[in-house]
Amino acid sequence: MAVTDSSRMKELPGTGNKGIGQSLEALEKRAREQRILLDNIPLQVWYLSDIDTYGRVNLAHARFLGFHPREIAYKKLDEFLPSQVAEVCRQSNRQVFGGKETVCTEEWVFDARSEKRLLEIIKTPQINARGDVEYVVCTASDITRRRHAEQALKESEKKYRKLIDSMVDVVYLFSDRRGGLFFSPSVEKVFGYSMDHMYANPFLWNDSIHPLDKEAVSRAISRAGEGKPFTVDYRIRDARGNWIWLSDRSITEYKSSGEIIITGVARDITEQKQLESQVRHLQKTESLGRMAGAVAHHYNNMMAIVMGHLEMALYDMDQESSSCRHITDAIKGTMRAVSMSQTMLSYLGKSGMPLYPLDLATVSARVIHELKKEIDVEIVFSNHLHGVLVQVMANRDQIKEILKNLIVNAWESMADIDRMDPVHIELTAAESHKIPRGHRYPVDFIPRAPSYACMEVADKGAGIPEEDMEKIFDPFYSSKFLGRGLGLALTLSMVKAHDGCISVEGGQEKGTVFRLFLPVLPIP
């Protein structure tokens, strides 16, 4: 500030000594008000005359350092700060004085109680008319508590993120307007899609719910109401096109805007559902087995009595009489009835037919050649085991019966849609762990051999609805216009007698693929 003497005061036009005194008093009053204002705010404020020199400081900054404002004002940094702290301050001072731009830093500083505190410091240069930095205004906020809270929050978030990332279940956040907002990483394993794909297609989850289950999901959400958890089981199509079962436990939140937010945890219960299906199937099979065994036993006893009396009556008759011819026909009919009893025993796996080591490729080729003459349908056979000896313990007649039943089933499936495409049969080899687990029969099958021969029979017929998959091997069950009796039921029984299994793949209007797996004998 320039010094004003009395001679210059006299030269000021229209200004007397009294007016100047009043102006100085006003300036002093304003300065006091500004100091009071600065000294009563928690924000630390000071200014720098140059890189090393403090100007005025407010009370908050002076107290933080453990001094009175007058002990700091117009002094060098090294006079009241440790040399290491002073050098840290000078680094940012050089930056703001040299760059002529505001600098924001975070610095750890010891306060008057020797506690290490984190300050958020903003240094703003004041530029004069010549473009030079006249002084720098500095402010500082103690953000130690905030930083500790942020670190605690990050640690907590890291802990819960690690927990969510390690979960097998899928944690998700879904909006009825914006789709999927969050998915835990387990969605990739359960659903088959990548995280990026899920976020790029926010309504993919909802759109993949089985049409027959969408109403149950909507009903569960509406019944639960806001803030109340609900649980619903439903099927969803994964990235591989398979239907998987999810048990979803969620909670619904209604926003003031009308948006519905669902937070949930979904668990893959496909294996559980399959086990439940297996239990039902085993119980049903056991019941049918007991019934069939009882029927076959009593049937054989009754037919033995009938056959005995017919043969004795025939022995005493004139061989040329009409009565003899009638009794002969009755015996033939009784023999056919006895064959039905044998069929029942075959269904129970008690036919007692011997098994021999057979080259499956050679036997299959011959059987298919014979079947082409018996069944009016084109058969395309592909043998992928050329030059490989694949032997199985099997009965040739039963292998023929199995293939015949599967081909007839394919022919009947295509007859329902009035189209006759070829039936494709492929012979391959498969390791035991590659045998499908879904829709595999008998349901209690456990692979015991290291490798299996796979006979695949595929058609482009009407297909099998999902809800009928468990019924197709039931005796006398058929969803087709054509088709009657024990065909597939006997097929499954014969496959079971060979220590093998059958898997079924396909859906309605997509055709059907039956895969027959028989254990391969080890090469001696």
Image (cartoon, rainbow, N blue to C red):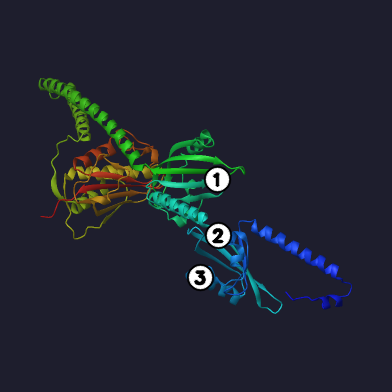
The reply to whether discs 2 and 3 touch (Cβ–Cβ < 8 Å) is no
Q: Which residue is mark 2?
A: 64
The image quarter in which residue 469 lies: top left
Tell me how far mark 2 sits from mark 3, CA to CA: 17 Å
Residue 326 screen position, x and y as percent? 20, 24
| Residue nearest the viewer, comparing 83 with 116 | 83
Along the polypeptide, which appears first: circle 3 or circle 1?
A: 3
SS for dot 2? helix
> Residue at left 42%, top 49%?
160
Q: Which residue is mark 3?
A: 88
Amino acid at dot 2: Phe
Is 167 drawn above or below residue 350 in the view shown?
below
Residue 176 — which label?
A: 1
Label 2 crowd bin: few (<14), some (14–19), many (20+), radius 10 Å: some
Label 1 crowd bin: few (<14), some (14–19), many (20+), radius 10 Å: few
Along the polypeptide, which appears first: circle 1 or circle 2?
A: 2
Report the residue that reaches farthest toward the right.
14
The reply to whether discs 3 and 1 touch (Cβ–Cβ < 8 Å) is no
> Residue at left 81%, top 66%?
23
Tell me how far mark 1 sits from mark 2, CA to CA: 53 Å
The reply to whether discs 1 and 2 touch (Cβ–Cβ < 8 Å) is no
> Residue at left 27%, top 34%?
282
